DNA sequence: CTCGATATGTCACTTGGTGACACTATAAGC
DNA sequence: GCTTATAGTGTCACCAAGTGACATATCGAG
């Protein structure tokens, strides 16, 4: 039980740290804010900050986690005979609906877009995520998908995700993310025919 | 004319620096190699290294430049009434054929894949590149493409590119990049119907 | 030969990030 | 109530990536 308790308080500290950090970033900018600033504002040392987040960039992604254990698991849980493109659509749609409500996402995305280092970090995380999704697609029971096609599917899905985010920001957060996602998944088709090249 | 000359020697120095750096990275790893190591091996100071490359990461992308002014220009140069997806395919295919021959690309890609920092930097560069391509698509005379669709097209194209690279690495550089690209562009279709959501 | 631009070296500094060690508070066991 | 293990924190020293300022060397044009 101590395990759970510790985890809970740890998460609380992380959340507070993230809160404080985002605030400072929004006001002063990412590069202009030092880790020591954040730590001090949160009442701790620089060293302690790094006990909660591995890098300065990661504090931004705390709330808006795009890595999503959940997504990977959900893919695997989908009916095995479902078209993989549809599986991706369903899972990602559910995920979009979740974060659609969340406040702060818009600010966070703007911050990321305005900060090259954060763009890099985001895509780095997403690269890991994609590999796992791609594996999940291939690993489905009875799946007859070659690695190249699996990558194609996964990458195309993130292509839609990125376009959704861009459009959503263009609309100042007014656009409907799930609707945009649906539109993207409809506009893009992925053929599964392997025998071709 | 001095302009050109300076540019030429500058490029030579950059190339040498890149050569040396890649060599060290290959042997010792990216993180284990310090900028001072590189500089010293190339007969100069750490400070001078940074006069040729803005960051340690960038030295890796010197040869394999994925930013490609050229690609953007080529897009704009394509017949205005051509299907944008086909334009992308043609331009990227030509580009793939160019680098297909190039040695060192495989090593470089492996290095990138093995180094999170480089993955981040690669995608960061590519993000900038994509925005410009997307703009180019919309800017074509007579083009009736909304921003969302333009992003969708561009992102889908990079989705193919990424899948090609992955597959190519999986095959230890034996696979035919242009052929893979064609296959990807054929497997993925992008609808241009705007009126939908 | 002199002048002016450009490349380079030197030095000092900031910042992200890490390892080592000491200290404190808390919770469990006696 | 006292002891003791343990997690969280502070402190300090350190490395490496960049950056700005300034001095110096080099080299081509006049």
Image (spheres, coloured by chain):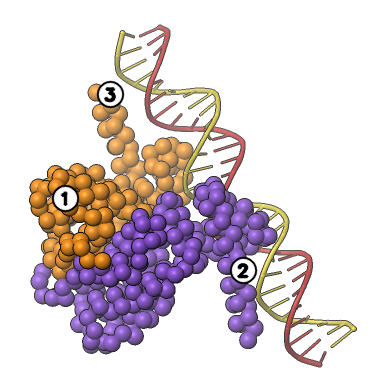
Chain colours: A purple, B orange, C red, D yellow
* A109 w.r.t. A27: above or below: below
* Circle 1 residue: B143
Q: Quadrant of the C terminus of chain B?
A: bottom left
Q: Give me the residue at 36% from left, 76% from top.
A: A94
- Residue density around tag 3, few if under 14, some if 14–19, many if 20 or more, within 10 Å: few
- Residue density around tag 2, few if under 14, some if 14–19, many if 20 or more, within 10 Å: some
The chain holding disc 1 is B
Decide if residue B116 is on the left or right side of residue B77: right
- Checking the image for residue B2, the label placed there is 3
| Distance Cα–Cα, label 2 vs label 3 | 59 Å
Q: Are marks 2 and 3 in contact (CB under 8 Å)?
A: no
Q: Disc 2 vs disc 3: which is toward the camera?
A: 2
Q: Secondary structure at mark 1?
A: loop
First in sequence: mark 1 vs mark 3: 3
Q: Foreground residue, B40 or A187?
A: A187
Tally of marks: 3
Q: Give me the residue at 38% from left, 39% from top.
A: B52
């Amino acid at each position: 039980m101590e395990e759970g308790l510790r985890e809970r308080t740890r998460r609380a500290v992380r959340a507070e740290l993230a809160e404080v950090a985002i605030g400072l970033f929004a006001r002063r900018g990412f590069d202009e804010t030092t880790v020591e600033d954040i730590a001090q504002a949160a009442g701790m040392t620089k060293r302690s900050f790094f006990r909660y987040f591995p890098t300065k960039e990661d504090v931004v992604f705390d709330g808006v986690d795009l890595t999503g254990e959940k997504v990977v698991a959900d893919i695997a849980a989908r009916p095995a005979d479902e078209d993989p493109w549809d599986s991706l659509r369903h899972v990602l749609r559910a995920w979009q609906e979740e974060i659609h409500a969340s406040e702060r996402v818009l600010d966070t995305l703007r911050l990321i877009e305005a900060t090259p280092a954060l763009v890099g970090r985001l895509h780095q995380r997403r690269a890991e995520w994609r590999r796992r999704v791609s594996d999940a697609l291939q690993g489905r029971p009875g799946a007859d998908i070659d690695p190249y096609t699996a990558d194609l599917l996964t990458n195309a899905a993130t292509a839609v995700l990125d376009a959704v985010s861009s459009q959503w920001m263009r609309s100042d957060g007014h656009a409907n993310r799930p609707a945009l996602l649906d539109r993207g998944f409809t506009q893009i088709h992925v053929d599964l025919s392997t025998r071709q090249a």
